[in-house]
Amino acid sequence: MSLQTQIREDLKNAMKAKDEVKLSVVRSLITLFTNESIAKGKPSADALTEEETVALVRRAVKQRKDSIEQFTQGGRADLASNEKAELAILESYLPAQMSKDEILKIAKKKKDEMGAVDKSKMGMFMGAVMKELKGKADGGDVKAVVESLFS
């Protein structure tokens, strides 16, 4: 079952269960899919590839994380907790992320391949690692691992 199909099924289930938070999140995702397909000139939201769908969910996750940070800094714990609930639902649609140990193994291998030994090549190295781990690892974790290799 594709991710979009699963999300549409979850919409029906959330309506039946009267789960307002999940319903809101799922509706916002479906709107994202529709808007993206219109922007790309595709005939329907179902025409999006699985990779495009996951990228849109990742974008929504990033927005929630940014909102949580802003609300926490602003002293609005009530709004931050709402965002955290939505974030948990969104993350359930993403594939499992790699651990820092797994990222470290791949980063060390890539470092040996590229011969990157100093910080001047860290940007190129970071790009190469991110390209290899695209969609499999959190960017923040990759950045932390890469910086630890060059420190």
Image (cartoon, helix red, strand yellow):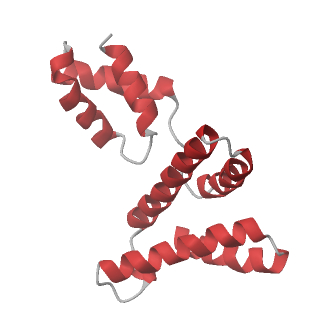
- Residue found at x 84% / y 74%: 17
In the image, residue 21 lies at what x, y percent? 73, 65
- Residue 7 appears left or right of 20: left
- Residue found at x 72% / y 80%: 12
Residue at the extreme bottom of the image, as rendered: 43
Q: Number of callouts in the render? A: 0
In the image, residue 52 lies at what x, y percent? 39, 65
Q: Nearer the viewer, residue 65 or 150?
A: 65
Does residue 139 lie above or below 94 as drawn?
Answer: above
Q: Residue 34's quadrant in the figure?
A: bottom left
Q: Nearer the viewer, residue 143 or 107?
A: 143
Does residue 93 lie above or below 33 as drawn?
Answer: above
Q: Residue 7's quadrant in the figure?
A: bottom right
Residue 118 in view here: yes
Residue at the extreme right of the image, as rendered: 17
Q: Residue 107's quadrant in the figure?
A: top left
- Residue found at x 36% / y 46%: 134
In the image, residue 49 lies at what x, y percent? 39, 70
- Residue found at x 46% / y 60%: 54
- Residue 78 appears left or right of 131: right
* Quadrant of the image containing the N terminus: bottom right
Residue 115 in view here: no
- Residue 89 appears left or right of 42: right
* Quadrant of the image containing the C terminus: top left
In the image, residue 39 lies at what x, y percent? 32, 79
